[in-house]
Image (cartoon, rainbow, N blue to C red):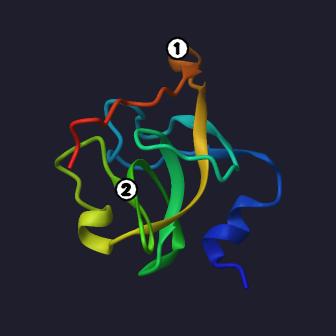
Amino acid sequence: MQTPAERSLGRGRLVHILVSGPSMVPTLKHDDHVLVHRTGRVRPGDVVVGSFRARPDLLVVKRAVRREAGGWWLVSDNEAVTDDSRRYGPAKVYGRVVVRCWPPRRIGIVSRTDLSGAE
């Protein structure tokens, strides 16, 4: 059975998502539009879309840090925002953010960050 977050993604391999909130600043900003490739291939440092077991109705855009027994440990790029795995634990990941497609002045590839020194 799909969670509300999974249903909201639809079935396509490439999904459009509107970013809401400041948790991924400076990488992504409120009202950025991104394309998500729905794939199982996620690596530490990727920006991903997922959901936490405690919040199955909410899609989140976060950075994948490491794979854990219960899913992926996800963190916000904005350290002041703690609505991530530090609060909710591991998350289920649905796909990897590949490109920012709106607004025009911010169009570009969303790149992976090297987390070799991350916790």
Q: Is residue 108 left or right of residue 28?
A: right
Residue indicated by mark 1: 105
Q: Quadrant of residue 98?
A: top right
Residue indicated by mark 2: 74
Residue 50 position in % (x across, y down): 53, 60
> Which residue lies most toward the left here?
80
The residue positioned 38% from the left and 54% from the top of the image is 66
- Identified by mark 1, the residue type is Arg
- Helix, strand or loop at disc 1? helix
Q: Is residue 106 left or right of residue 45?
A: right
- Identified by mark 2, the residue type is Leu
> Which residue lies most toward the top here?
105
Residue 1 to residue 44: above or below: below
The answer to whether marks 1 and 2 mark residues whose Cβ atoms lie closer than 8 Å is no
Q: Characterize the local packing of mark 1: few (<14), some (14-19) or many (20 or more) Cα atoms within 10 angstroms.
A: few
Residue 85 to residue 64: above or below: below
- Helix, strand or loop at disc 2? strand
Q: Nearer the viewer, residue 70 or 86?
A: 70
